[in-house]
Amino acid sequence: MKTPEEFRAEAHKMADRIADYFQQIEQYPVKSLVKPGEIASRLPDFPPDHPEQMDDIMEDFEEIIMPGITHWQHPGFFAFFPANSSYPSVLAEMLTAALGQQGMIWETSPAAAELEQRVMEWLKTMCGLPADWTGVIQDTASASTLTALLTAREKATGFSVNHDGFDKEKKLRIYCSTETHSSIEKAARIAGFGRKNLVKIAVDDNFAMNPSALRDAITKDLNDGCRPCCVVATIGTTSSTAVDPIAEIGKICREHDIWLHVDAAFAGTALVLNEMRHFADGLELADSYVFNPHKWMFTNFDCSAYFVKDPDLLIRTFEILPEYLKTRTRGQVNDYRDWGVALGRRFRALKLWFVIRNFGVEGIRDKVRKHLDLAQWLAGEINQSPEFELLAPVPFSLVCFRFRPLQISDESAIDNLNEKLLQLLNASGRLYITHTRLHGKYTLRMVTAQTNVERIHVEKAWTLIRATAGELIKSGNTGE
Ligand SMILES: *Cc1c(COP(=O)(O)O)cnc(C)c1O
């Protein structure tokens, strides 16, 4: 492809292909059924020396690549948390790729910088976040949390670790619950705190952090000569969407001058609804906050919204100014390379802007409300079914449950049975669910938050789950 005309023809074909894909998506098995190595074995060992035609490339895409695709945009995708896309988001990504912006500083893409600033203000308004916060887009919640821990570290040490390294510091301690996402431990390691200075606080019966256990841990550390540096609280934990008591935790943090970072990677989108904002009570006490529009806000991966109370601390932590990046606009505009780890930045604000405008805030609210209702419907069905049980409250759109037939009482047999059930369901190609462990029990997780999921998909899934569970019992193949 060399000329704009050749590109135009291919792009038209591609648009048709993408539209066909969305139209026919329910014909694909949700979870890819290939074996490890199967795709790689069909790819040539060496790259082509000479140009290949787009038709040939696309033929291989269909034959080799598509079988190895797990269909995250399939309405039968109930696994993990969603990584939702949508029509306006896909269109924006086409433009993003075409423009190929490198938004490291304002001058390299003034529109990318200024649109980012504005859409982050929009998100703040949409979700009722504190008006004095400032937002920046990061690639992932993992990167946002790393950014938070680094800033907390520098604030606690008067910016000395950046300069001198860690040597002279007291032990800096980080606190999170036993249910916190693994990205917090990863960030604690990368930021130099060390895994053993990450203190995991016990949770209550509903998997939310116990604030008095947090207080005790902080007191103990102070007595031992450590320096409590940061607490990471979660709104919507990954296993069960539990909500840590932000207001109480925030109060403890304020008493001891500890940074509070709140991770709402998945559930944060629910704050578009007034009736869900009570889950964020006390959020104004946080120093930083992250949620992922790339999970539940119909903006395709990657797009993570990170907010801070004090952007000066953030910039002082990350700022580096080599001669070749000095500009005359510095100080008047946001140079986002100083707001996180990477220098180079994609133009992610564009797809968020397209999504918010094309859905409208009310359109986003309608979808989120529907997803919450679907989860309540499913939870109701499970509650009424003598052979299934809920294993956690359902505050958002994740339902945690298991099959528990009356004739089996041994816990490990029930675990095996549910593991077998999960495998059979996912091998059917008709849905994809994943698992966790809650109170030691093997737990099925079903998230009703895919962009295009409707009541019919959840009903069909529930029917299939019951039928498959029934067959498992009938066949005596209970995994024992
Ligand atoms: C998904 C998730 C993360 C990680 O998100 P990435 O954007 O993939 O880094 C972190 N915390 C919670 C609570 C999550 O659900």
Image (cartoon, grey):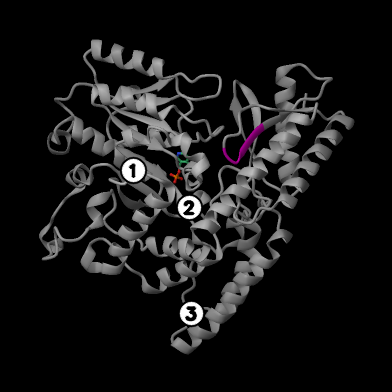
Q: Which residue is mark 1?
A: 130
Earlier residue among tags 2 and 1:
1
Residue 247 screen position, x and y as percent: 38, 28
**Which amino acid, mark 3?**
Pro
Q: Is residue 130 left or right of residue 447?
A: left
Residue 189 screen position, x and y as percent: 33, 32
Q: Which residues are magenta?
A: 396-400
Is 202 drawn above or below residue 150 in the view shown? Answer: above
Label 3: how many Cα within 10 Å (few below 14, some 14–19, many 20+): few
Residue 216 screen position, x and y as percent: 35, 13
**Which amino acid, mark 2?**
His
Residue 51 circle label: 3
Residue located 19% across and 30% down the image: 156
Q: How far apart are the two marked residues, 1 and 3, measured between alpha carbons? A: 54 Å
* The C terminus - image quarter: top right
Is 7 drawn above or below residue 70 in the view shown? Answer: below
Residue located 22% across and 52% down the image: 338
Q: Is residue 103 left or right of residue 15?
A: left
Q: Is residue 344 left or right of residue 350?
A: left
Residue located 17% across and 25% down the image: 169
Determine which quarter of the picture holds residue 404.
top right
CB of mark 1 near ligand 1 (< 8 Å) = no
Q: How far apart are the two marked residues, 2 and 1, measured between alpha carbons? A: 21 Å
